[in-house]
Each structure stands twice: as structure tokens, then as C-alpha cells.
Amino acid sequence: MKTFTATPADIDKKWILIDAEGVVLGRLASIVANRLRGKHKATFTPHMDMGDNVIIINADKVQLTGKKRADKTYWRHTGYPGGIKSRQAGEILEGDHPERVLTLAVKRMLPGNRLSRQQMTNLRVYAGAEHPHEAQAPEVLDVKAMNSKNTRTNAGTA
């Protein structure tokens, strides 16, 4: 038996639409990272971009468990001495670009190499419910129905 290695002709990319409203951030990010890498396919080849194109809508309504909305800190550096800056997850989600929390969570679940940077270009995240990719006819992936732990209501968070 020979080991199967995919070639560019073997790759079949689909478009997937995911609604992030009420879904737990980390669980959603791990599902999206697997879809971007293509690990859900039987023909997965580690050195090829096998993954699907993923569209995420309602990224501003993603849920965080526990006290992460207030306690989780995102750090960045301006490049100048003493230029370290921090923001809480809640500040970013309520700010102008709430989709950055989800994008960063997915990015950090992929390996840090050239291939994962190429795979991140297949991810499109939108804060609202509208997206400009209707022409691609994306399949809807219901993350809420996969597992009951994937969702969190506002009443249950403490």
C-alpha cells in the first residue's frame, strides 16, 4: 500500500458559512482551524493547503466562558521602548473591530509557518450578519448543533 499524497489537482475547496452568535470562542476557533487546515478530509496532506474557505458572521456576538470577557488580556507592542499596550477581550468585542478576537484565536490554533499564513487568507470574519460572498453559495455549518457545550447563553455566564 502506498501512502496517498494530494496534488493541487486533487484539492477540492468548498465555501462554509458559520454563524458565531452564542457560540463559545475557543470551541468555534478549534473547529474553524481544523476546517482551514483540511484535517476533516480523508485526503488530508500536511504540506498542502487542503482546507475550505470559511466565512464567519456575527463575530461580535461570540461568547466567552467564565470571567474571560473582563480578565483575558491581549498584548501588543508599538515597536518603541516601553511601548507595550494591552486591551481586555470585552473592550475589543465592544469596539470597532470585534472580529479581531475570533481571527486571533483561529490564528493561534494554527502552526506558525508559511502554510498557515496562506491558510489564514481563506478565513473571512464579519462582525454583522451580512457578507459579500453569496455568489460562492456557501454551505451552512451549524456549530451549535454539533455539541451542546458549543453554545453559551448570557443568563448562564458568571
Image (tube, helix red, strand yellow):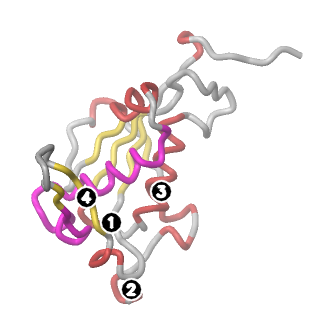
Label disc, if present, on residue 62 of the rendered structure: 1
**Which of the two discs, 4 and 1, sits closer to the camera?**
4
Where is residue 79? Give x, y as percent.
15, 43
10 Å neighbourhood of mark 1: few (<14), some, or many (≥20)? many
Tag 1: residue type? Val
**Which of the two discs, 3 and 4, sits closer to the camera?**
4
**Which of the two discs, 4 and 2, sits closer to the camera?**
4
Query: For the point 61% across and 27% down, which residue is it?
Result: 46
* Residue bounds of the magenta highlight: 86-111
Separation of marks 3 and 4 at Cα, in angstroms: 32 Å
Q: Quarter-wise, where is residue 118 in the image?
A: top left
Separation of marks 2 and 1 at Cα, in angstroms: 13 Å
**Which of the two discs, 3 and 2, sits closer to the camera?**
2
10 Å neighbourhood of mark 2: few (<14), some, or many (≥20)? few
Tag 3: residue type? Asp
**Which residue matches tag 2?**
157
Separation of marks 3 and 2 at Cα, in angstroms: 22 Å
Q: Nearer the viewer, residue 153 or 2?
A: 2
Query: For the point 22% across and 53% down, which residue is it?
Result: 76
Which badge, 3 or 4, is on the more N-terminal residue? 4
10 Å neighbourhood of mark 4: few (<14), some, or many (≥20)? few
**Which residue matches tag 4?**
75
Which badge, 4 or 1, is on the more N-terminal residue? 1
Separation of marks 1 and 3 at Cα, in angstroms: 14 Å
Where is residue 146? Give x, y as percent.
57, 61
